[in-house]
Amino acid sequence: MNGPFFLPVRDIVRKPGEMREHRFEVTLADKWGEGIVTVEAGETLDLDVRLESVHEGILVSGTVDAEYVGVCGRCLTDISAPVEVEFQELFAYPGQEETDFEVQDDHVDLETLVRDAMVLSLPFQPVCQPDCLGLDPVTGEKLTVSTGAESAAPIDPRWSALRQITDQDDTTESRAAEKEES
């Protein structure tokens, strides 16, 4: 077994209290993520991993740094930003309870663990800047300043009867205000 995400644990297997630290880089062969932002193939991941031997298996914890690319969810401008993810998982010894991750042939394979942590940390609705106004609904151009006028959302016809009640309340209040002024 070899690959960029395989780490040997032969020297700490079944030796609780032993620990090893690894710092390494991995270049992705495939794109990670399927949303409007992804970690592209060819991107370099910086991993800082700690392997600790415990009675149940090998506890793996660490961080991974990378950069995602995609488009703004409001204005469709290209964006890229760094992402740092922390992860921790127990790789159980084989033959024990059923677990998602196991020590295999004195190695741990971090690929699934790191990929899942990275993809789940990608923003669901990324924006190019926090106050991005998006696109103009009429022209399709990127808005740079607020128009100041908020357009009223269309009212569902099923609620139109309630609109009449609120209009009556407004007229009653304005009549009462007129009486107070006179």
Image: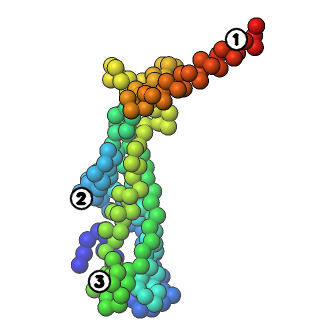
Q: What residue type is labelled 3?
A: Gln
Report the mark closest to the observer, 3 or 2.
3
Give the amino acid type for the residue marked by disc 1 in the picture.
Glu
Q: Is residue 108 left or right of residue 58?
A: left
What whole-number distance in Å separates the C-alpha atoms at marks 3 and 2?
23 Å
Q: Name the residue under label 3.
A: 104
In the rendered structure, which disc, 3 or 2, sits on the residue that comes first in sequence?
Answer: 2
| Residue 101 seen anywhere in this rendered image of the structure | yes
Give, as a three-letter code, the residue at label 2.
Ala
Label 1 – label 2 distance at C-alpha = 74 Å
Vertical arrangement, residue 173 with respect to residue 70, above or below: above
Q: Write the residue at 47% across / 36% down.
A: 129
Q: Residue 87 carries which label?
A: none
Q: Position of residue 36 (x, y in %)?
A: 32, 44
Residue at point 34%, 20% (across, down)? 138
Callout 2: SS: loop
